[in-house]
Image (cartoon, rainbow, N blue to C red):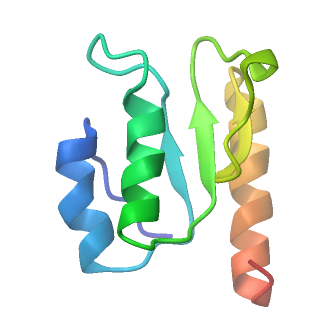
Amino acid sequence: MHIDVALSTEEATPLFRRRPYDIIVSDIDRDGDRQAGIKMLRLLEQHKIDVPVLIYTGRFDPERGVDRRIFAATTAPVELVHYVIDLMERARLGSL
């Protein structure tokens, strides 16, 4: 597994435009922008990058709607690990 770390959408953009990823893990609320994660999803669409996104955040309200690009969202570290394992297995089997 290879992991790249970016602390903002601006840092991540050149990374995901340079090479494909199997998973993107992101927060919704970054740097005081409560829509930062949603803006990143729009940017992925704009660049036609179709990759599952895991949202790992301190708070997530699915009642407000869930973007189609969000594979899963969690506030629990153990759940995040399970989602990553699930997605990596799907990528290995070619079923993403």
Residue 78 in the image, given as x and y percentages of width and height: 75, 32
Residue sitting at 74 percent across and 59 percent down? 85
Along the line of sight, which residue is nearer the eye, 23 or 77?
A: 23
Above/below status of 68 relative to 3: above
Residue 44 relative to residue 23: left or right: left
Image quarter of residue 55: top right
Above/below status of 67 relative to 21: above
Residue 56 relative to residue 2: left or right: right
Residue 52 in the image, given as x and y percentages of width and height: 63, 60
Quadrant location of the C terminus in the rendered image: bottom right
Above/below status of 76 relative to 5: above
Residue 32 in the image, given as x and y percentages of width and height: 29, 10
Residue sitting at 26 percent across and 52 percent down? 12
Along the line of sight, which residue is nearer the eye, 57 or 41?
A: 41
Number of numbered discs visible in the structure rendering: 0
Residue sitting at 67 percent across and 42 percent down? 67
Image quarter of residue 35: top left
Residue sitting at 70 percent across and 44 percent down? 81
Residue 43 in the image, given as x and y percentages of width and height: 36, 54
Above/below status of 88 relative to 74: below
Along the line of sight, which residue is nearer the eye, 69 or 54?
A: 69
